[in-house]
Image (cartoon, rainbow, N blue to C red):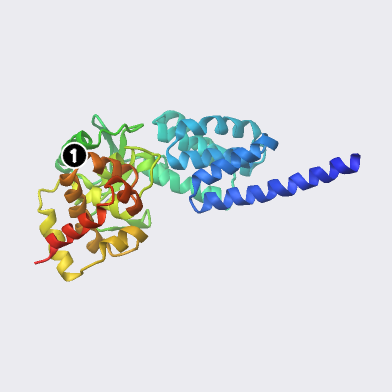
Amino acid sequence: MKRLTALLFIFYSIITLGQKREMAESFSIHNFDKAIAIGKEILKSEPEDFETNLTIARAEDEKGNFNAAKPFLEKSKTLMKEDWQKSWALLENAKNNFGLGNLEVAKQYYKDACKITGTKNSTKSLKSFGMLTGLDEFYNEWKIKETKNIVFHFQNGVNDEEIIRIMLTRQKAFDEINSFFKSQLPKKIDFFVWNMTNSFNPVLNRNLGFSTPVFSVSHNRLDQTPGHEIAHNISFWKSIAGRKTHFINEGIAVCFDQKKSDKLKAASEEYQKNPIDLKEIWKNDSKIDDEMLYPISGAFVEYLIKYDKEKFLELTVNQSYEDASVIYKGKIDVLISNFILKLKP
Ligand SMILES: [Zn+2]
């Protein structure tokens, strides 16, 4: 009997080991729902497993499901013993609280995490989170200004006139864009304005502007459109449950950039230079140059909104071509063809 129990124990350990590997793999390819489902299975036999509790919390946070992550974060805190565990758990608590808008709590977790000697990866993640969100001491001298929906962070050197212009235009953009989407953001948008007009930002080692909507964060150059990055944040929070695609996401950001420009004309000029296969790009989320993608996806979104606003709001939540086939009741190919006709001379 003893031997049988021992054998069963080994048997179950091997199964859980395989499940843990699968959970980690699912997380790494951003299949967060699967990582959560496997994690919850593992917890049935190993409720005190640190890594599983933390992975579920991380996956929920990545989705923007901050409240669902809470119980697993609490459990992780009671289970963390080694420094590497503390560094990951404290960082995740900082992320979770930042995402919910609990800034002071997030700051404290961030500071505590900085005091721990973590692994190479956790230290790197902590630094990049601090640089993304403004928690890093790099931002100590930046000017902070607030409006109803946005916390602005201005780098030194941005003059007062620019500060006023940016604050007014971005808050106005927020109001106009959200009168369409009616999203509920969990916090104000942290809107960083770098004193530069070049795309490449050597400090962040990436191009500006960009947004990380799950944390309602946006990093910007001085010379961007008022609405592009704001639209990314607002449309993300229409619903966190759906599927996103690069094609529709960028289309939304261009369509709502608040520039008084003729979107269809810009798309038509681009299409005549590069007649892209819209359906193929949308379907396969193919990578093409932003200069080609932006005008065409922007005009396409504008066209779909004019066709049917309610259906487009559904597409904002689930953005794949297959989703569109369902939402537009089999008519999406006709809509695409009619739109392409408008781009031809
Ligand atoms: Zn964009």
Left or right, 14 with respect to 53, comes to: right
Q: Is residue 186 above or below residue 8?
A: above
On the question of residue 88 being in view, the answer is no
Q: Position of residue 323 (x, y in %)?
A: 34, 49
* Mark 1 element type: helix
Q: Quadrant of residue 143?
A: top left
Identity, as a three-letter code, of the amino acid under mark 1 = Ala
Q: Position of residue 147 (x, y in %)?
A: 23, 31
Q: How many marks?
A: 1
Left or right, 213 with respect to 193, comes to: right
Binning the other alpha carbons within 10 Å of mark 1 as few (below 14), some (14 to 19) or many (20 upward) gives many
Q: Position of residue 315 (x, y in %)?
A: 29, 45
Does the numbered disc 1 mark a residue whose Cβ is under 8 Å from ligand 1?
no
Residue at 55% across, 33% down: 73
Left or right, 276 with respect to 26, comes to: left
Q: Position of residue 212 (x, y in %)?
A: 36, 45
Q: In the depicted view, which residue is nearer to us: 233 or 317?
A: 317
Residue at 21% across, 50% down: 301
Residue at 75% across, 44% down: 12
Q: In the depicted view, which residue is nearer to us: 189 or 9?
A: 9
Viewport quadrant of the C terminus: bottom left
Viewport quadrant of the N terminus: top right
* Outermost residue toward the bottom in this view: 273
On the question of residue 148 being in view, the answer is yes
Q: In the depicted view, which residue is nearer to us: 143 or 67?
A: 67
Question: Which residue, given by chain and number where applicable, does mark 1 sit on?
Answer: 173
Residue at 31% across, 62% down: 281
